Amino acid sequence: MTATVALETTLARIRESFGVEPAGEDPKRPLDIMHLVVSVPAERWVEFARFARDALGCLYFCHLTAVDWKAEGFEVVCRVGNLETGLGLTMKTRIGPTAACPSLTGLYRGALWMERECYDLFGIRFEGHPELRRILLPQDWEGHPLRKDYAVDTPHPPYR
């Protein structure tokens, strides 16, 4: 299967299964099987991740992070990949100001620490995570430093 056929097949499967249009990471570049971006609603987050793992063969959990869009809430961003075909898939979901997102730990073991890190730094609660607690900062740390409303001059004795 050529890369072009693989790309068209993958795009068609995503469109048919979820009714969303995959995009490329860079709008100036044509779609590339190595850099697909798919935005799904939070209620289909786990379903899409399962589809990526089982139907597209994306077994490699690369990373998970978030973006704070201030009043518009948060966006959780996750990258998975199929190391055999070269498919790289960035999944995004908007979760609004409630900062709650379904956990992917039931599908990917790699999500365990990355969701904890995201919780620690952004305060996003991953519903269904088996051990959601701080991982980088002390348990008594107040606030989440990567939120845009976090005051960088907040005193945290004995750290400051």
Image: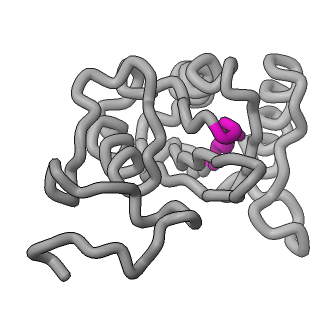
Asked if residue 133 is positioned above or below residue 2 in the image, the reply reads above
Image quarter where the C terminus lies is bottom left
Q: Nearer the viewer, residue 6 or 99?
A: 99
90 in magenta:
yes
Say which residue appears at 24% left-offset and 38% top-offset. Answer: 133
> Left or right: where does residue 35 sit relative to residue 108?
right
- Residue at 38 percent across and 41 percent down: it is 115
Using the rendered image of the protein, determine whether residue 84 is visible from the camera's viewpoint. no
In this rendering, position of residue 150 left or right of residue 94: left
What span is in magenta? 89-97
Q: Residue furthest left?
A: 158
In depth, the one of 86 and 61 nearer the eye is 61
**Above or below — where is 100 with respect to 66?**
above
Quarter of the picture containing the N terminus is top right
Q: Is residue 159 visible?
A: yes
Q: Residue 108: x percent and y percent?
A: 37, 30
Compared across the picture, whether 73 is left or right of 154 comes to: right
- Give the quadrant of residue 59: top left
